[in-house]
Each structure stands twice: as structure tokens, then as C-alpha cells.
Amino acid sequence: MQHEPSPRPGSAEPVTLPTQRAAGCPFDPPTGLAELREARPLTRMTYPDGHVGWLATGYSAVRTIMGDSRFSSRYELMHFPFPGGPDGPLPPAPVGDMTGMDAPEHTRFRRLLMGRFTVRRMRQLAERAREITAEHLDAMERRGPGTDLVEAFARPLPALMICELLGVPYADRRRFQDHAQTIMSMDAAPEDTHAAMTGLQEYMAELVAAKRAEPSDDLLGDLARDSDLTDEELVGVGGFLLAAGLDTTANMIAHGTFALLSNPAQAEALRTDPDLAPQAVEELMRYLTIAHTSVKAALEDVELDGQLIRAGESVTLSLEAANRDAERFPDPDVLDLHRKATGHLGFGHGMHQCLGQQLARVELTVALPALLGRFPTLRLDVPAGEVPLRTNMNIYGVHRLPVTWDED
């Protein structure tokens, strides 16, 4: 996407959101964010629709705003920071979309789901993750060197896991995967996004009707049987969980592998010490920050970092810039799997912190060392600069990752 150049950080004029990543730097945040963070971690920003709000790039400012209930997550109160959005505030969140809710509505949904996403329950799924991982690595090995890692490995693992957890037939994946991709696109035409949301809701409505008629032993079946959610709410929250579970972890597996293959010493460290995986996952979440940008809206006047954010103003939060803040993470532009990256914002922070983060941790902790261990000579099959990046998506990553390896 092309944008007008931002004024220099020292200027009193509002900036525009930097989105262009430097050539040859697929893991670094867009050029300009670091300069803004060093000059003014909280600065005025002009939105594509003309609204003048704020851009937060410093770790402290971003984390503070994410945990402050004086800032709303309701879409209809905020302005879209990327070109191509509505001319004015966004439409309200669809029913069940927890990212666009505030308390007490958000609290009601989260309480229903929290007990089903506990650390203990997600760890119990680790054995199933190992089985699925081994099956797909076996299939890759049988086919021989040369494959797209996204299709062969990164996408199927989380798709199977979230489908089994929710009770969604994996055989139906073609009915919902394309819809999820369109919903995540930042530059999809409004009518295409609406059609994708409608298609996903129609699919989930059929599934919910089946669960109501005959509840099953899975998350959607539990909610159909035991919760007070209406059919519309159950359809909405089911679609929300399905879309989120499909896209985010798949991109972390693929983009994380890309980062490791581009840093051979780090890949070797994980290959030779699989017990490093939990710590490595946290560092990769920090370093890559694939869920790169969020927006909040001030519900009242708030003073922060010597600046007055007025009620009604939107604040864009650059999580990828915050996770590269040297005041919080020394040498932040270096991928170091031995780093203690606790406190990173890769899963968000506050009441909207990722509900499925423990499931993602399980999948990543299993998948990455297993992949590197099975294929010690794994490498890119194209020059790094030819790997197609998801620069136009709400979740950053790669569209494809061609890889190869040496046969024994």
C-alpha cells in the first residue's frame, strides 16, 4: 500500500501511520516507526478519513492504554488507521466478535470461555498436537524435498486443532478458510468483507443448529447445552473463535520458520535443544508481532506521557513498534531465543489479551522444534526476497514459504 510520506518525527504536524517495510527486512516493523518511537512514543496522527487522533509506539504507552478501561474497543467509536476503510467511524462489531466489545458485554462472553481455554486444558491437547505434527511431517517426508510449508504444515496443524476443539468438521475447511482470509485482509473491498462474514455466519448457523439438536462433546456442543447464549450469539462467537484459531498460529508457524531459517544459529539452538521451545516461542512472538496494530477510542479525557488525549479521539497502537522498544527489551532488533521475552505484547494485554494464547503456545512449542528436528537441512527454496509477504493483512506473515531439504 502506498501512503503520503510522514512528516519528520520532530515536526509538530501530525504523522500518518508508517506501513512500508524496508526491502530485505521482512521481520522488522515498517520504516519510520522506530524514529517516531524514539522521538515521541505518543504522537498526533492523521487518519485516512481526516480524523486527527494519536499513534502510540512506545512499550509503556501501548501497554498502559491496552490495560486502561477509559479506552474503548468498540469499533463504532474508532477510526480505521489504514486506507480503504469507511469514511468515518467503523460499523459496530458483529455479534460475538469479542475484540470489538467493552465490559460488561465482553466480560460475559469471556467468563463463558475462560474455563474452556485454561493452561491445564490446553496442555492436555499437547499430545494431539504432537500426533498431528508427526502425521504432516511424515507426509512431507514421503513426498520428498520441495514444498510450500504453509499448505503442507503451517496451516493444517492449527486448523485441525481448532476444528477439533470447537467441534467443526475439518472436511468443511474450504467453506470457511477463504472467508477467514478475506475478513483478515486490510484492503478487501467492503462488499467482499461483508460477503465473507455472511458466508462464515451461514456456515456456523448450520453447525449451531446441529449442535442444538444433538449437543456434542466439544466446545460448541458444551456452549449449546450449558450456556445462555442465543443462537445468534453462539454463531457469532463460534465464527470469531474459528477465524482467529485458523489464521494467527498458522502465520506464526510459517513466519517463525522463515525467521529461524534466516537466522541459522538460532535455528540450530532450537534444533539441538528442544527444551528451549517455550522460551523461543515467546521471543518469536515478540520479534515478529504478527498481530501488529490495534486501535482504541478514548471514552473520556486522559492525560498520558504529558499529552492530553481527548474523549472521542482514536489511538492507534503499534504493537510491533512497542515490542521493539529498547527501553523494555535490550537489543530489540536481534532475534535471541535465549532472551527472557516475558511481558511482550504479541498476545496483547489487558482484558482483550488473546483468549487462545495457551493453545497457540502448545501448537508452536510442538511444531517448530519437531519441524527442525525432522529436517536438519531445511532451507528456503527461493531467495528470501521472493517469499510473498502478507503486508496487506491484519495478521502479518507469508502467503507461501517454499522450502526444501536434503534427502538422507
Image (tube, helix red, strand yellow):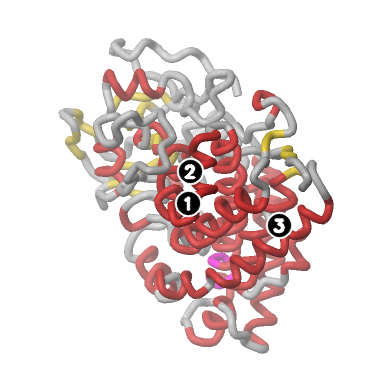
Does any portion of residue 352 appear in the rendered image? yes
In the displayed structure image, the side of residue 83 where residue 103 appears, left or right: left
- Circle 1 sits in a helix, a strand or a loop, which is it? loop
Residue count near mark 3 (Cα–Cα under 10 Å), binned few <14, some 14–19, many ≥20: some
The numbered dot on residue 273 is 1
Q: Which residue is most to the front?
A: 408
Residue count near mark 2 (Cα–Cα under 10 Å), binned few <14, some 14–19, many ≥20: some
What is the magenta range? Answer: 233-237
- Return the residue at label 3: 137
- Residue sitting nearer the eye, 179 or 85: 179
Pointer 3 and pointer 1: residues touching (CB < 8 Å)?
no
Spatial CA span between label 2 and label 1: 6 Å
Identify residue type, mark 3.
Leu
User: Going 77% across and 54% down the picture, which residue do you hit?
Assistant: 141
Residue count near mark 1 (Cα–Cα under 10 Å), binned few <14, some 14–19, many ≥20: few
The numbered dot on residue 269 is 2
Spatial CA span between label 3 and label 1: 19 Å
Of the numbered discs 3 and 2, the one sitting upstream in the chain is 3
Identify residue type, mark 1.
Asp
Residue 170 in the image: x percent, y percent?
Answer: 72, 67
Residue 234 magenta-drawn? yes
User: Going 41% across and 30% down the picture, which residue do you hit?
Assistant: 334
